[in-house]
Amino acid sequence: MARTIEPDCRQCRREGCKLFLKGERCTSKKCAMERRPVIPGQHGNSKRRVAFSEYGTQLREKQKVKRMYGVLEKQFHEYYEKAKAMQGATGENMLILIERRLDNVVYRMGIGASRKQCRQMVNHGLITVNGKRVNIPSYRVKAGDVIAIKENKQDNEIFKGLRGSKVVMPKWVEFDTNTFTGKVVALPTREDIDSDIKEQLIVELYSR
């Protein structure tokens, strides 16, 4: 399976914002964006401001979203093509399609500390959808789907601190930390995606 091998903190520094790729570390003083908020590389400490062209601004926005969700270029472009064929705003449709990925839903439910960790959980067969094991991170959930941690995996060490804890999650999903079972209450809307994303820039980039 293709994957990004660039260090997580380096990706945040490259995009100039927190992408929350390392869970709790991103909210602590150890976060690279807190300690060294400069572009990585030989000239990262230069005081000279980099002025992006229109294309460069659009490209950086696309790269930021790709890295945030852990999606590679081919699959990301496929989301755009599907969104373009749907009714409504292409940019919003694209974000909603990506938001419905199983690994992202598991992350939104608070089961894992980062999307990367949640993607590994799905890959390793720890998550079920409607009672059936699903090991495809890009699996697209539907409203009413029941998401749960596989029963014989609930004693896994990574879930030790999850049971009985309080988790903050968006209104379109719910998860019971006592039974390790959740549900997709409704499909997400653009208002439910609180990340600072300018999706219109991505649409303009792909429309060139």
Image (cartoon, grey):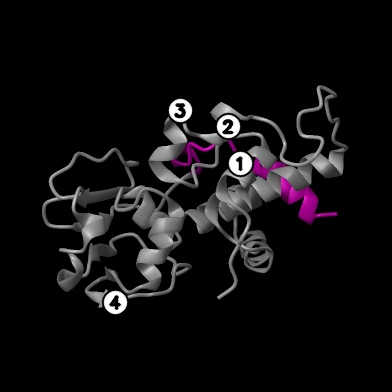
The tally of labels here is 4
Q: Is residue 187 above or below residue 130?
A: above
Residues at marks 2 and 3, CA–CA distance in whole angstroms: 9 Å
Quarter holding residue 76: bottom right
- Give the secondary structure at mark 2: helix
Are the two marked residues, 2 and 3, in contact with CB atoms closer than 8 angstroms? no
* Residue 205: percent from left, percent from top: 79, 50
Residue that numbered label 2 is attached to? 33
Q: Are marks 4 and 2 in contact (CB under 8 Å)?
A: no
Residue kind at label 4, given as amino acid type: Arg
In front: mark 4 or mark 3?
3
Disc 4 residue crowd, few under 14, some 14–19, many 20+, Cα 10 Å: some
- Find disc 3 in the rendering and name its residue: 29
Label 1 with label 2: CB-CB less than 8 Å: yes
Q: Nearer the viewer, residue 45 or 3?
A: 45
Mark 1 or 2, nearer chain start: 1
> Cα distance, mark 4 to mark 3?
37 Å
Residue type at tag 1: Cys
Range of magenta residues: 190-208
Q: Residue at x 48, y 68 (%)?
A: 138
Q: CA distance from mark 1 to mark 4?
A: 32 Å
Q: Which residue matches tag 4?
A: 133
- Disc 2 residue crowd, few under 14, some 14–19, many 20+, Cα 10 Å: many
What is the distance, in whole Å, between disc 3 and disc 1 at their CAs?
Answer: 15 Å
Q: Residues within 10 Å of mark 1 (few under 14, many from 20)?
A: many
Residue at point 61%, 48% (across, down): 65
Q: Earlier in the sequence, mark 3 or mark 1?
A: 1
